[in-house]
Image: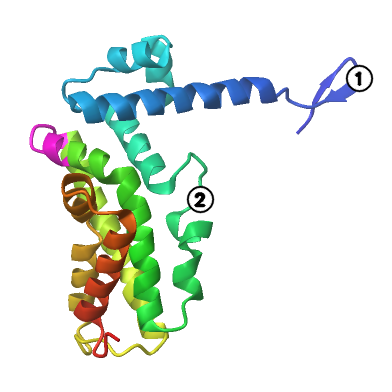
C-alpha cells in the first residue's frame, strides 16, 4: 500500500543508482573471490583478502554474502551461468540447441558444446572446491550439490533423447544412461585435455560428442 504524507500518496523510494552500485560491488567481489580461490585455494583465502582485492571493506563483503561458503556458492553459480542473472541454466539461450535438436545424436552434439562452454568457465573453480571439500564440511556440502546438479543435467539430456525416441545402447536402463552422461559432463575432462594437454576447444567438443554418441546410442552414426 502506498504511504500517505501531507495528504498525498507517495510510493516507497527505490534508488536505481543505489541498486546498480550494489550490483557492481557484488560483481567486483565475486570476480576477486574467483581469482583468489583459484590462485590461493579456498582455505587460504579470507573474506578480508577478497575485500582488499575488490577494493571494498570486509563488512561490505559479509553483508552481501554472509559467509565465505555462501560467496563460494555465488562464484560457482556465476561461473556455470556466465553472469549473475537469476535464470536457470536450462533456460539460457546457449542451452537452446539441446531443446531444438531433433535426433538423439543432435542432442548429444549440442550437449557436448554446452559442456565445453561450461568447462571453460568452471574447471578451475570446480577443482578448487574438490580440493577444499575434504577439510571443510561446508565446502563438502557444496561439492555434493555440484555432483547432484551435474546428474540433474544428465537426466535432462537423457529425457530429451527419450522424448525423441532415440535408441539407447542401455535399452530400458535409464539410470545407467544418466550415469554415463554424468560421467562425461565432468569439467575435469576439459581440464585434463584442454588445459593440461593443450587440445583446441573444437577438438575437445568433437571428441566429447563422439564419446557421448558411442556411449549412449545403439547407432552412434
Mark 1–mark 2 distance (CA, rounded to whole Å) = 41 Å
Q: Quadrant for the N terminus, please.
A: top right
Question: Can the viewer see residue 79 in this picture?
Answer: yes
**Disc 1: which residue:** 7
Vertical order, 112 against 82 (above or below): below
Q: Residues within 10 Å of mark 2 (few under 14, many from 20)?
A: few
Residue at image position (33%, 40%) is 76
Is residue 160 on the magenta stretch? no
Asked which quadrant contains residue 15, the reply is top right
Label 2: which residue? 87
Q: Is residue 178 visible?
A: no
Q: Main secondary structure of the magenta part?
A: helix
Q: Is residue 92 left or right of residue 141?
A: right
* Residue at disc 2, secondary structure: loop
Q: Residue at x 41, y 40 (%)?
A: 78
x then y, percent, for residue 140: 16, 41
Q: Residue furthest left?
A: 134
Residue 20 falls in image quadrant: top right
Residue 154 tag number:
none
Count of number-bearing discs: 2
SS for dot 1? loop
Q: Nearer the viewer, mark 1 or mark 2?
A: 2
Which residue, as the protein is rendered here, is positioned at the far right?
7
Display colour scheme: rainbow
**Which residues are the magenta region?**
130-137
> In the figure, 3 relative to 166: above or below?
above
Amino acid at each position: 500500500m502506498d504511504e500517505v504524507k501531507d495528504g498525498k500518496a507517495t510510493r516507497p523510494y527505490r534508488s536505481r543508482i543505489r541498486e546498480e552500485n550494489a550490483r557492481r560491488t557484488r560483481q567486483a567481489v565475486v570476480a576477486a573471490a574467483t581469482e583468489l580461490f583459484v590462485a590461493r585455494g579456498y582455505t587460504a583465502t579470507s573474506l578480508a583478502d577478497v575485500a582488499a582485492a575488490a577494493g571494498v571493506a570486509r563488512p561490505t563483503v559479509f553483508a552481501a554474502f554472509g559467509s565465505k561458503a555462501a560467496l563460494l556458492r555465488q562464484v560457482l553459480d556465476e561461473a556455470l551461468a556466465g553472469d549473475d542473472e537469476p535464470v536457470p541454466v536450462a533456460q539460457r539461450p546457449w542451452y537452446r540447441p539441446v531443446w531444438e535438436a531433433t535426433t538423439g545424436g543432435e542432442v548429444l552434439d549440442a550437449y557436448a558444446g554446452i559442456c565445453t562452454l561450461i568447462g571453460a568457465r568452471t574447471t578451475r573453480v570446480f577443482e578448487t572446491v574438490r580440493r577444499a571439500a575434504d577439510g571443510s564440511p561446508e565446502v563438502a556440502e557444496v561439492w555434493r550439490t555440484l555432483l547432484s546438479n551435474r546428474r540433474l543435467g544428465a537426466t535432462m539430456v537423457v529425457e530429451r533423447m527419450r522424448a525423441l525416441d532415440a535408441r539407447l545402447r542401455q535399452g530400458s536402463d535409464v539410470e545407467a544412461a544418466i550415469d554415463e552422461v554424468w560421467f562425461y559432463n565432468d569439467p575435469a575432462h576439459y581440464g585434463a585435455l584442454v588445459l593440461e594437454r593443450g587440445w583446441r576447444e573444437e577438438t575437445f567438443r568433437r571428441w566429447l560428442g563422439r564419446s557421448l554418441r558411442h556411449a549412449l546410442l545403439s547407432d552412434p552414426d
